[in-house]
Image (cartoon, rainbow, N blue to C red):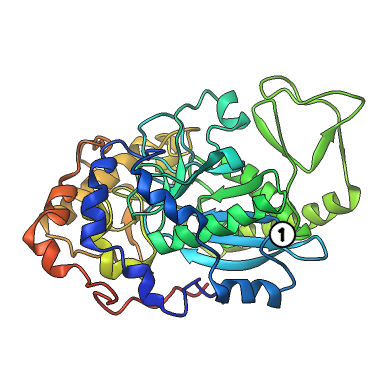
Amino acid sequence: MREMAMSSNSDRFFRIGAFALIAAAAAFLGGCEETGFGSIGAHANDPIAPETVALMKKMDTSENAPVLIRTYKKESELEIWKMKADGRYALLKTYPVCRWSGQLGPKTREGDRQVPEGFYSITPAQMKPNSAYYLAFNVGYPNAYDRALGHDGGAIMVHGICSSAGCFSMTDPQIGEIYAVVREAFTGAQREVQMQSYPFRMTAENLAKYRLDPNIGFWKQLKEGSDNFEVTNQEVVVGVCNKHYVFNAAPANGAHFDSDGPCPQLKRDEEVSGLVAAKQSRDDAKVAELAAQGLHPIQTVYADGGQNPYFASIAAYASRPDALSRGPVDVALDDSAITQGAVRKGRMSPVVQVAAAKINRAKVAASAPTTAAANPKVADSSDVTASITKPAKEADKPWMFANFFGAKAAEAAPADGAVSATPAAPVAH
């Protein structure tokens, strides 16, 4: 079991507070703004919490040692890894993500509300001490792979406030600590922090479940990168050629990578390649076994992203609580869905879009509860007759005024130093 990263006083993660959110509400209209109120920058130099420093020492690392970040949208988790004295990374903390937006799958264009997936680099210049969202850093989207595929957009952050329009949104205390850990790694001369962003944990079980999802080809690329990290516990060397990720390989004979052009002859560490191939073989066998046992392929559809169950008690203060209340829907895929385009590359199939539209309308009509269910419902992709819903727009934000400026929100807001409700227990994996 992985423990969620909560401070000794876990109440801190719920002290978002109505007044702080009202003060920042104007910034939400612009999505992930890079800068905001100058006075907020005072938090940029806050020290790492003593208990976190003690944890680093216990695991044979230090404040200035290199750091690596891994994120998982479906599980709504962000991991901080630190390099130990032996040069290998070890997991320091797992933080529950307060809000992410969009669907599982890569970001492809400005305004699609998608949280990007892939391998990104964070440099000191990407740190945003004066962010309108308490503190923030830019993840580096689009990278070379994104650009090769013509994906656009930008200003994708990890930030506070629990509001997302394509960003990884944490609570203010969380981003305060994450920002400090990254800042100290830069102080220790780390040039770039690698951020690995995944749709879900790259397990054989998840690959079996999503084996017919239209993004499965892309996700298999990400899994190769994940496997390289997991067999070495070292930062993955990332290249792009022929519009495809290449991991832990270097061009041979003085060649270079061309993200759009053919891949050159590559040289690899044979030992690492062997370990990766063995892991992939085991996972492929497990996927085949699960499929043979009847594990049905699915596609998970969200009204607009999700939130870790730990934050269910403050869901009303996150962005688009109406979308959170609907929860994810697992749409079963079958041969008929395949023939109608469910595995078409690069976009959600019409069958799944229509199924999601019907389910969402039914939930709204039935006055869905205010917090997302812990487990998604399953819909049959063959039971579809309704029209396709339009993607959410930035202007569609009644939550901002209803929840931040209404009397009901003021009454429900936790007092300073208090918790609005008992938080849900962290999810064990």
The residue type indicated by label 1 comes to Ala
In the rendered image, residue 375, in percent from the top left (x then y), is placed at 36, 67
Q: Is residue 145 left or right of residue 113?
A: right
- Circle 1 sits on which residue? 65
Asked which secondary structure carries label 1, the reply is loop
Q: Residue furthest left?
A: 407
User: For this rendering, which residue is in front, 399 or 33?
Assistant: 33
Q: Is residue 58 left or right of residue 311?
A: right
User: For this rendering, which residue is in front, 377 or 391?
Assistant: 391
User: For this rendering, which residue is in front, 142 or 268?
Assistant: 142
Residue drawn 18% across the image and 56% down it: 363
In the rendered image, residue 405, in percent from the top left (x then y), is placed at 12, 53
Q: Residue furthest right?
A: 253
Q: Is residue 170 left or right of residue 263?
A: left
Residue drawn 73% across the image and 51% down it: 235
The answer to whether residue 327 is seen in the rendering is yes
In the rendered image, residue 331, in percent from the top left (x then y), is placed at 36, 52
Residue 10 lies in what quarter of the image? Answer: bottom left
